Every structure is written in structure tokens, then in C-alpha cells.
Image: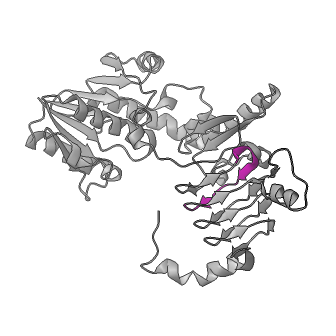
Amino acid sequence: MNILIDCTNLKVGGGIQVATSVVNDLNRLELLHQFVVVLSHQMKDSFDRTKFQKNIHFIDLDDHCTNKKRISKFLLNIESAYKIDRVFCVFGPSYYKSKVPKLVGYAIPHYIYKDSPYFDEIGWVGRLKSFFYSIVKVNLFRRNSDALIFETEDARDRFMTTHNFRKKSYVVGNSLNEVFADKSQWLDLNLSINAGLKILCLSANYPHKNLKIIPEIIEEMLANNEFDFKFVISLEKADLKFDSKYDQFTGTPRYIGVNVVFDDFKLIKLGNRVVVSDHAHFLTHDYSITTAQIAVGKIPKSDIALVRGISVGNNVFIGKKAIIMPNTTIGNDVIIGAGSVVRGEIPDNSIVIGNPCTVVGKVTDQAIKWEKLLQSENARYD
């Protein structure tokens, strides 16, 4: 059997993750069918195609396919050219009627959860648009699918009842993405998070995600005497518009390199958009006081350490092999040069280098000097 896997609707976030899992699972199962996987422009680089079985063929969406009509024609041509027997559209709706049976995935929650906080977020104009879009898209689900797949029983029951859908339907759970079960795909960020309870929130900032509930959760936890926790959110603080009083419970370092050493997580605070380069050290203890005591004839019963914290502000770059000493406070918008030894108060908008480090300039002045470099071939955007 020849099966078309249609991923052309997928552009960001969870949809791409689900499609990636589906295709990788097909590869592991070593089925006898022939699979033709059509990828959206955003998914072209999602797979190492050299690692797939010969019965899985990848086709990239043509560059001229810039609207639903052209994409539909492109897919119909593939159905004919590859003599497709079945179509699976990972997430619908599908915008064309296939010549063969088609299975379509459903993942539009606000068309079935009418009491969602999403509708408060989008205002009356958004609610009006959502109403008309739901009519069009539900009709596309009816017309262009022979069966639907839902991620939960509740979603299926609501859709079938609300929209009087009479065709076949199935439920396939999607609570765990494959990447969480495969350590070879993990990226070790070495995040320093000073909290007993660490709550990870990986999400794009879509209105239906209802991320504004996080401050409410924080308030509830505080009311229940939970103080030692922190949310780690994969978004910029400006996107969320949380009150600044929640800063101590949230933080999103931009990047932390390999072999970074954090002496004591509980004594180190990192702000938003902090970049820590490889082999940097954050030291919160100092045993040299023991040596000093012995030198003046005061031999202690055991080694003594002075233990003091480190605080790093927002938008800070820390260069390779820099050493941040105990009792250091680094302000906002700071660049610390590679190999620097940093101690004490580092003011906002500073560039510091050396051992011991000294302020050699302002970040805002350097930004102006670097303006021309941003237009050169040397600028790389990651």
C-alpha cells in the first residue's frame, strides 16, 4: 500500500513535533508499506533523511506553493504520480478532496471548548473571526476527511456532539513527545536554577495556551506556603507581560555553554537573556581564609569557607573561561570579556575585562560601533 503523509499544514510548535514523532515511528516500525512524506517549508530540515528506510520518501513542498489552492493541486499531483492508496493529514483541516480515503488529525481546541479563556484574550473582533473560521474549517473536516483522529476522548466526544460528526473517529494519545524518551536527542543546557521545585513550560505564546494563568498559579503556591520554586519558560519576559513582582519565580537564560561550573545553585541568580560561554565558573565559596588563619598562627579545627552568593542581571554576556567570584553582583546589559575574573559590583551598561576585571567601556557605545558589522557577511543569526 502507498500512503501519503501530509505535513503541509504544519509551521511551528506542537504540530511539527507530532509529525516528527509519527515519521520517526514509521521508520522504526519497518512496515512493508511505501510512505510518501510531504513536508511544509518549515519542516524541510526536520529529518536526517540518510537514516530512513528505503520505503520512506520525502518530498519538499515547492517554493511556488504559497497558498492553499496551489498546495492542494501539488498534493493531488503527488497522489496520482505515486499511485497513493491512503492519505494521512497529520493535522487538518485538509483543503482538498482526495481520490482515496483520508484520515485527518484534529487539534483546534477553541472550536470545541467554547468556555476557554482564549476568547477573553482575543476580544470581540477575534471572537467574530473565530466564529466564521470555525464554520469554514469544520465544514472542511466534514467534506475532506473520511475519519478523524483526536488526542483525547473528551475532545472527540465534544467535537462529535457539538458538530454532529457521523464519520469514523479514533483517539491517539499525545501526552509524551518521543524526544523525552530518547536521551541522545537531549540538549544539556546546564541551567542554574535556584529552587527545590523546577517547573518547565515549553510553549509558543498562542492565546489559546492561556499562559497568563502562571501568575495565578504562583499566587496559589505562595498561599499554600510553597516558596522554593521557579518556572522556566521558553519565551521572552516581554511576551508574557507578567508583573515584575514575579521575577523571582521566573527566569530564562538565553544560553549556557558546555562545562560551565556552578558552585552552589541555591546561591546563584541568573536574569533573563543571560549568555554564559563555555568553561565559565561561578564560585560561591572561598577557602583561602583557612590559609590566612594558619599564616597568623590560628590553626582552625577544620577548613573554613566564606560562602556568599552571586547575582547576574538581565541581558548579560559572560565570555569563555570567565570566573565570577563570591559576593558579586552584575548589573543589566553587561559584557564580560573572556578569561575575566569578576568580583564586587559591576554597574549596568558596562564592558569589563581582565584580572581583576576593570570597566573599559559602555555596552551602548559598543553597539553603535558594531552597527556596520551587522550588515556584513560576518553577522550570523542563530
Based on the displayed image, in which of its 4 quarters is residue 118 positioned?
A: top right
State which quarter of the image contains the N terminus. Answer: top left
- Reply above or below: 24 against 70: above
Q: Looking at this view, is 179 or 157 the one in front?
A: 179
User: Which residue is painted at 91% across and 54% down in the image?
Assistant: 298
- Reply above or below: 63 against 175: below
Q: Is residue 38 left or right of residue 109?
A: left
Q: Is residue 368 left or right of residue 108?
A: right
Residue 260 appearing in the image:
yes
Q: In this view, does 133 lie to the left or right of 245?
A: left
Q: x and y percent of residue 8 in the render?
A: 30, 44
Magenta span contains residue 378: no
In magenta, the rendered stretch is 264-278
Colouring: one colour
Outermost residue toward the front? 297
Residue 72 appearing in the image:
no
Q: x and y percent of residue 26 in the render?
A: 24, 32
